[in-house]
Structures are given as C-alpha cells and as structure tokens.
Image (cartoon, rainbow, N blue to C red):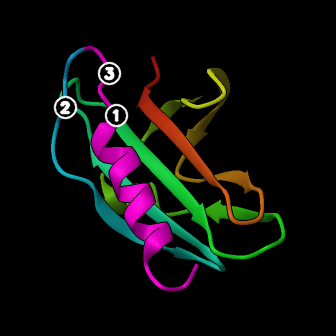
Amino acid sequence: MADGRCECHMMNSLCEVNLGGCHGLPAMRAGTVSAIDVFMKTLGDGAMALGFSNRARQTETADYNKLGLIGLAGKYHVRDLWRQKDLENAQGAFEADCAGSWRVLLKLTRAP
C-alpha cells in the first residue's frame, strides 16, 4: 500500500495505544528500514511505542539499529503489544520480523 493507507493505519494504531491510562505524545515517523516504515510514540508513562509497517508482500526483517538516535540509549525491555508477548531486551538495536503487508507494535520500557 504505497498510497499512504498503510502509514495512516499505523499512525492510528499508535494514537490508540493507551497503556496505564496515559496517552502521551502524538505519534511520528522514525524512519524506514528496507520496505518497513517505523513509527514511534512516547507514552505518558515514559515508555516508547514503536510501530513497524511492512509495505512488501513478503516477510521482511527490520534490523532497527537507531534506538539511541530516537532517545532510547541503554537497555530496554521489549513487549509485543498485539501478541501480548515479552521479547528479548534490546540495547541500541533489535530485529523485528514483519509479515508481508502486516504490522508489528512494540512497547519499550527501561530495563533495570
């Protein structure tokens, strides 16, 4: 969906994230990795929601290595919000598999 519908859907998904009753700041584009668009939203509880939207028909792996550039320096706990599953902690970078024409929505919180 190169016509912007995919981007609008991810922005809407991030805008609807309401964790702990805290809406936080508006969602914004954080970059592109291959065919995957990356969106971010700072939540009211200080966590960060990251959304990955795959424009390709096949599964793509987002090797996202810019956490420090978007204000996430250090070690972070990663949770897949749609699958309700904790993932490995991330420090500076992480990988996310995103099925063709699909999206991944993650919450990153500072790890102890």
Q: Name the residue under label 1.
A: 17
* In this view, 70 is above or below 35: above
- Whether tag 1 and tag 3 are in contact, CB under 8 A, the answer is yes
Residue 50 lies in the magenta-colored region: no
Foreground pick, 9 / 85:
9
What residue is shown at x 64% (from left), y 74% (from top)?
A: 55
Q: Which amino acid does label 1 sit on?
A: Val
Q: Which amino acid does label 3 sit on?
A: Leu
- Whether tag 1 and tag 2 are in contact, CB under 8 A, the answer is yes
- Magenta stretch prevailing secondary structure: helix
In this view, which residue lies farthest toward the right?
A: 58
Alpha-carbon span between mark 1 and mark 2: 7 Å
In this rendering, position of residue 90 left or right of residue 88: left
Residue 23 got which mark?
Answer: 2
Q: In which quarter of the image is the C terminus?
A: top left
What residue is shown at x 28% (from left), y 45% (from top)?
A: 15
Residue 10 lies in the magenta-colored region: yes
Q: Which of marks 1 and 2 is nearer the N terminus?
A: 1
* In this view, 30 is above or below 40: below
What residue is shown at x 72% (from left), y 76% (from top)?
A: 56
Q: Quadrant of the N terminus?
A: bottom right
Foreground pick, 30 / 19:
19
Q: What element carries label 1?
A: loop
Alpha-carbon span between mark 2 and mark 3: 7 Å
Label 2, residues with CA under 10 Å away: few <14, some 14-19, many ≥20? some
Range drawn in magenta: 1-20
Q: Name the residue under label 3.
A: 19
